[in-house]
Amino acid sequence: MDIELMKEMYFRELEGKTTQEGRLPVHVGLLTVIGGALLFSLRNPVASGEGLFVPFVVVVIVALVLFIISIVQICRANIGHDYERLPRVDTMYSYFLGLTKFYEKNTNVQGTAEEDFDDYLKRKMVEATSRNTDVNLLRSARNHTAVVLMALAAVFSLASGAMALSRPSEGLKKTEMRIEKVIVNNLSCEKEGSK
């Protein structure tokens, strides 16, 4: 097998690691938006006597479950994955020196230190590339699952937010009343000041 092809495949899988790691900030951003929508829904729930109460509770529970599972999948995709690397240069150099000494002492053995070292290097590249391919495939599958779950969580979060907005809760009514009081007070102060 051609060593250049092996190098290309080895480095492609290491680039795949960088790609997998680059997805994390996007996922965290999406989770932040979904979490914000859920928090809004939880802080402004539909009142228990209204017709939308039961659907609201179901939608919020489903959204929370999907949100939590998404977080778990993102953690599983980004934590605990070991990538294989080629041995350290000093280790490879020591191995090469050992091969050189072996062939100097055993002149009747066929082959050369360079040939054996090339075989060693190829074997290590194949092992590392295979391991890294497996890790990248696993992480990619988990990231894909997380994205699907986040999309569903976003839909349910937006639905719960829409339900919360459709009928103002007591908290929103109180806020509206406070705003009206401030406006009325300002208007009465302006009338008194103009007299």
Image (tube, rainbow, N blue to C red):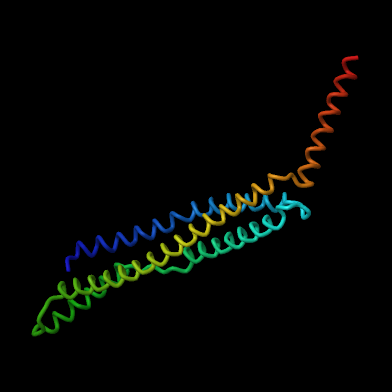
> Farthest top residue?
195
Task: Indicate left or right for 154 with 141 as reference.
Answer: right
Look at the image and tell me in which quarter the C terminus lies.
top right
How many numbered callouts?
0
Q: Quadrant of residue 118?
A: bottom left
Q: Closest to the observer: 33 or 111?
A: 33
Task: Indicate left or right for 48 with 125 as reference.
Answer: right
Residue name at image x 32 percent, y 68 percent: 88
Residue name at image x 43 percent, y 54 percent: 22
Look at the image and tell me in which quarter the N terminus lies.
bottom left
- In the image, residue 166 above or below residue 143: above
Picture coordinates of residue 45, whole percent (x, y): 72, 52
Task: Indicate left or right for 84 with 21 as reference.
Answer: left
Task: Indicate left or right for 170 with 95 as reference.
Answer: right
Residue name at image x 60 percent, y 63 percent: 65
Q: Closest to the observer: 129 or 176?
A: 176
Residue name at image x 87 percent, y 15 percent: 194
Picture coordinates of residue 140, whole percent (x, y): 41, 62
- In the image, residue 66 above or below residue 52: below
Picture coordinates of residue 116, whole percent (x, y): 17, 76
Q: Quadrant of residue 193?
A: top right
Q: Closest to the observer: 109 or 4?
A: 4
> Farthest front residue?
51
Picture coordinates of residue 64, whole percent (x, y): 62, 60
